[in-house]
Amino acid sequence: MTEMPVAPTLRGIRYIPRWLGGVSCYIVFGLGGLLSSLTILPVLRFWPGSRQQRIRRVRAAVSAMFRFFVAMLTWAGVLKLYANNAAKLNETDGQVIIANHPTLIDVVVLISLMPNVGCIVKQGLWRNPFLRGVVASAGYIPNRGAELLLQDCQQVLDTGTNLIIFPEGTRTLKDNVINPFARGAANIALRTKTDITPVVLRTNAIGLTKQQAWYQIPRQTIGMRVEVGTRFAHHGYDADNQGQAKAARTLTRDLEHYYRQQLDKNL
């Protein structure tokens, strides 16, 4: 497995190019989202084909744009990505993909590696002028009432599209290995009878955390390794035998234990 070297901490004048480069990446990302919403994404969305074909085209385009953003962050020295076995993600269809949430850019990294994926998006992004066109065109799911959310997830998964969920709900708090897992991912997987593929995002430097604003560019390059784990089969948690609520609690407990065990390893 590729080792992630720890980068030096930039101080004083040496930090200025890093800060300028990192902030420029976010500005390009925001403007790119706005411009693509007005140009290429509407073309892809309304190009002839079935509704699902149009959405898949848009999702593939968003994945390509996110790969470009990750490349920009790498150029600026903000991020160094180690996607050792991430090719496994392209072999999955119609599965719930869960991940821990150490940084601001986790969903960008995952979507950059997976053209066939949807995600649940907080309502605020649907009002963001830079990103609302992207999330709407890609058919991403708004985080609304439980039953409506479940119906939306079922429709996405039934088309063979994967679905990204962060069970922590928000970015990992500083000094925590992970935040306690909510039961949302387990409930969705069990009620839609979908398997779960866990992805561990392992970082070697603190940056882009919940406690930091987006413009607080890290002074150390964040090494991030993407590790795809062994699938959790939904039929191993038969709700008929123990009840839906208990099955979801059991699966959530096992998923959280898996992540704590993996992230406690010094790899």
Image (tube, rainbow, N blue to C red):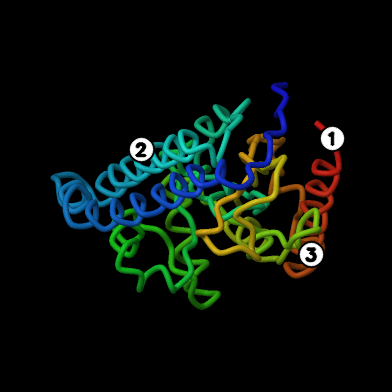
Say if 221 sits above or below 170 in the image.
Answer: above
- Kind of residue indicated by mark 3: Arg
Q: Nearer the viewer, residue 73 or 166?
A: 73
* Neighbours of disc 3 within 10 Å: few (<14), some (14-19), many (20+): some
| Mark 1 → mark 2, Cα distance in angstroms | 32 Å
* Neighbours of disc 2 within 10 Å: few (<14), some (14-19), many (20+): some
The part of the image, by quadrant, that contains residue 187 is: bottom right
Mark identifier at residue 64: 2
The residue that mark 3 highlights is 249
For label 1, the SS is loop
What residue do we see at 28% from left, 42% from top? 57
- Kind of residue indicated by mark 1: Asn
Select label 1 or label 2 by which is in front.
Answer: 1
Residue 266 left/right relative to 184: right
Q: Position of residue 126 (x, y in %)?
A: 37, 70
Mark identifier at residue 266: 1
Q: Which of 31 and 48 is in front in this view?
A: 31
Residue 131 left/right relative to 177: left
Residue 109 left/right relative to 188: left
Q: Nearer the viewer, residue 77 or 181?
A: 77
Q: Where is residue 186 in the image (x, y as percent from the top left)?
A: 68, 59
* Neighbours of disc 1 within 10 Å: few (<14), some (14-19), many (20+): few
Q: Residue furthest bottom?
A: 145
